[in-house]
Amino acid sequence: MKLKALLAATCAAAFTMGAAYAEGVKVGMITTLSGGGAGLGIDVRDGFMLAVKQSGRADIEVVIEDDQRKPDIAVQLADKLVQQEKVDVLTGIIWSNLAMAVVPAVTAQGKFYLSPNAGPSALAGKGCHKNYFNVSWQNDAFNEAAGAWASENGIGKVFLMAPNYPAGKDMIAGFKRFFKGDVAAEVYTKLGQTDYAAEIAQIKAADADLVYYFLPGGMGISFMKQYAGSGADKPVMGPAFSFDQGILGAIGEAALGVKNTSHWSKDLDNAANKAFVESFQAEYGRLPSLYASQGFDTALLLISAMGKADVKDADGFRAALEAAEFASTRGDFKFGPNHHPIQTIYMREVVKEGDVVTNKIIGTAATEHTDAYAADCKM
Amino acid sequence: MFSRTDMSLILLIEQLLNGLQFGVMLFLMSAGLTLIFGVMGLINLAHGSLYMVGAFAAAGVAAATGSFALALAASLAAAAIAGVLVEVLVIRRLYDRDHLDQVLATFALILIFSESTRWVFGSFPLYLDVPAALSGAVSLPGGISYPAYRLAIIGIGLAVAVILFLLISKTRIGMRIRAGESDREMIGALGVNISVLYTAVFALGAALAGFAGALVGAIQSVQVGMGEPVLILAFVTIVIGGIGSIKGAFVGALLVGLTDTLGRVLLPVAFGTFMDPSSATAVGAALASMSIYILMAGVLLFKPTGLYGSA
């Protein structure tokens, strides 16, 4: 009899507790699922949905939309998600220019935005917002770590190359911030350029010890293949975006031995990451990229906050997000004062494991790295 | 080993070769485009999709068989078949419509091609590499080392140009194509089967575009949407060369290739003589990306129908 009463009381308590969070969270995901950059958005989406599935929570509803890598479409989708779908949280944007078009508007309307990829400097410094959380990195971070690493490893002169658009300039500025040597040349190419013969000839003629470049997606594939066949012998390095898992398959062996900086790698030794890599491969039949790990971490952060507070209680939910108590695939995870991660950046090298070209960690490039803009952020 | 001037002379020659290679590749794209526009009066925005079809077919066949020669043959065949299907099913209904309808319909074809390619091959770029025999660089006289594959592209492109020239000027089908360009009704009245001629021209143009896609795919990235940036350059080329003229397409392609390549290299240097390095790089890079459009505007100013266009 007593036992029955106890059970009933427990159930009642469980119900009332459940009622506090019963409404769940509606997530709007705007990401790139078609066109040239689709591989990145698909990885973020798959990583995110894998974490949602593994959590077993039925109270997360995700509305997924394709921005086609176009800022105007991203803005329309954000309006639709906020006004019509009435989502609580937005996420998913890959490109910095799209993030700049969407994030300030949605955070101003009281929605939360969790960035699984883009980290433009404007949103880390003066333009920071209490409802904006960057779960990936600030754009400069990998490059700052790479600059520091190059200096420590006796690189005296470097050839820099990036596409001529804001993120490209952020990346090069980040490298130069921590690099103590000389810049032999600084070349900005057209965004989306596919032929690098002219630049490669300049590289061959330049007096430099290292070629450092940021060329994400198809641009990186084209450059690396052409560079390998050109007879040029200068070592190359870049942020992880130039050598992520999605494009290594297309570059093939031409990328072997190339060094790149990243906050994550599939061989990072922690339990959460091992489980993630294994389950991602089992679910989708391919190796996860860093974009997939970021999508996965973003969902974990959201789920951790849902366990602590109701999303309608904005202050409580924000505090729960700030605490960031989840088992990240990159090991320890914490936010700095501007809601950007303070994290370790590793140096990776492209290796061949069996038939697969992939990355392996060879050292640490920066420990507990904070972005350069946190001081400008007044929340 | 080299003095400073030798070094920059070598660099300049290498850049000239780069410009030539880029131009030859553009010619393969624009030859088909200009024929289709000249003979049928059709604006075909889906030409870039045929380029993509060629590259994907080559990547697929290369992955399955490991043979680059088979891959090139597959690119020709796949793009020609895609071209015939598109012409018979869609384009044929558009000849009598105005250009706006053609633009709309062929734009729809771009979307259909892109999404079906994604459906079949997935969203991640495919792997296609240069054949082992042509990998690496070769030494040219004067101490220049240049990628063997790019030299091969120049050679193949020039050979295709010669073959096309002979085909157009010496053969019966070439005569009909030229006749079709100058008077469409009359050649029909003379008993030439116009619809077969149109399909053949379309297939030829498509095959050339697919061939270009496969050649270039080996040194670039084989991915959905790879054709559209090239399509824009091809349009610039045929406008400069004069619409409908193969000779114009050839000269235009070389002009565009050389202007673009040399602009990218020389403009930042030129601005560097009187500006500080970082703003010279920025201004030079910005102006370099405009250079071919400035060239086009310049040519149209003096020759409104293009270099070899007929009024």
Image (tube, helix red, strand yellow):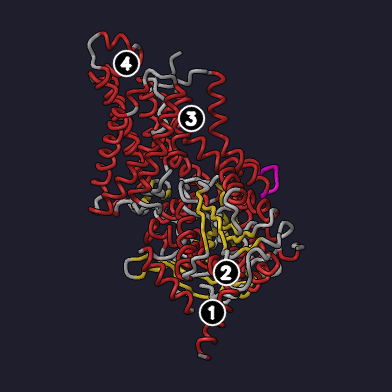
Tell me the amino acid under the disc marked 3: Val
Residue occupying the point 54% across, 29% down: B295
In magenta stretch: residue B169: no
In magenta stretch: residue B274: yes
Q: Earlier in the sequence, mark 2 or mark 1?
A: 1
Q: CA distance from mark 1 to mark 3?
A: 73 Å
As displayed, is residue A102 above or below residue A234? above
Q: CA distance from mark 2 to mark 1?
A: 28 Å
Tell me the amino acid under the disc marked 1: Cys
- Label 4 belongs to which residue? B180
**SS category of the residue bearing label 1:** helix
Q: CA distance from mark 3 to mark 2?
A: 49 Å
Residue occupying the point 61% across, 58% down: A88
Residue A179 location in percent, x, y?
64, 65
Tell me the amino acid under the disc marked 4: Gly
- Label 1 belongs to which residue? A11
- Which residues make up the magenta segment? B272-278
Give yes or no for contact between labels 1 and 4 (Cβ–Cβ under 8 Å). Answer: no
Q: Any mark on residue A301, and which?
A: 2
